[in-house]
Amino acid sequence: MDLNFSKGDGLVPAVIQEAGTGKVLMLGYMNAEAFQQTRASGYVTFFSRSRNKMWVKGESSGHRLKVVDILVDCDADALVVVAEQSGPGTCHEGYRSCFYRRVHGDNWVETEPRSFDPAKVYGGSNA
């Protein structure tokens, strides 16, 4: 099974979609090792571009993403990972989805309420 990691400097984007609802929860990036670890463990693993290291979603919050299915696009350079979300949310800002705002005129408008307090989950840091 070959993915094309060359277009993205060794990374492929991975859209995380909630099983059952189809709601887009987040976007992350995987290198070959993160993809293999995701497949082997059954939990979504990313490569953090800002921290330059691998990380399992939920390793600090406990809000893990259990893999249900993995879809690849026609160019084999992007993924959709269908996952079951444990915990009240995926977003480090305290929302169920990282996509909790929409464009309304010239403004961003929140489309859902916070589902958890990020200060309590991340110990005062929401990053």
Image: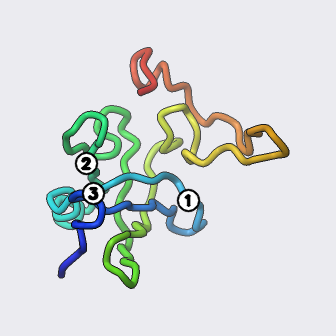
x and y percent of residue 83 in the render? 42, 63
**Closer to the camera: disc 3 or disc 1?**
3
Count every numbered label the image shows and give the total.
3
Q: In this figure, which residue is indicated by the disc labeled 2?
A: 47
Amino acid carrying mark 1 in the image? Val
Q: Position of residue 102 (x, y in %)?
A: 72, 48
Disc on the earlier residue, 3 or 1: 1
What residue is pinned by disc 3? 30
Callout 2: helix, strand or loop? Answer: strand
* CB-based contact (under 8 Å), mark 3 and mark 2: yes
**1 and 2 marks in contact (CB < 8 Å):** no
Task: State the image coordinates of residue 104 (x, y, percent, origin top left).
Answer: 82, 46
Displayed quadrant of residue 42: bottom left
In this picture, residue 121 sits left or right of residue 43: right
Label 3 and label 2: CA atoms lie apart by: 5 Å
Mark 3: few/some/many CA within 10 Å (<14, 14-19, 20+)? many
Residue type at the position of mark 2 = Phe
- Could you say which is closer to the camera, residue 79 or residue 57? 79
Calculate the distance from the C-alpha at mark 1 to the C-alpha at mark 2: 19 Å
Q: Residues within 10 Å of mark 2 (few under 14, many from 20)?
A: many
Label 3 or label 2, whichever comes before in sequence order: 3
Q: Viewed as shown, does residue 34 lie left or right of 63?
A: left
Residue 8 in the image: above or below residue 60: below
Q: Which residue is the site of mark 1?
A: 24
Residue appearing at x 45%, y 53% in the figure: 27
Image point (81%, 40%), residue name: 106
Q: Can you say which quadrant of the picture contains the C terminus? A: top left
Residue 120 to residue 65: above or below: above
Residue furthest to the top in view is 124
Residue at x 28%, y 42% (from the top left corner): 48
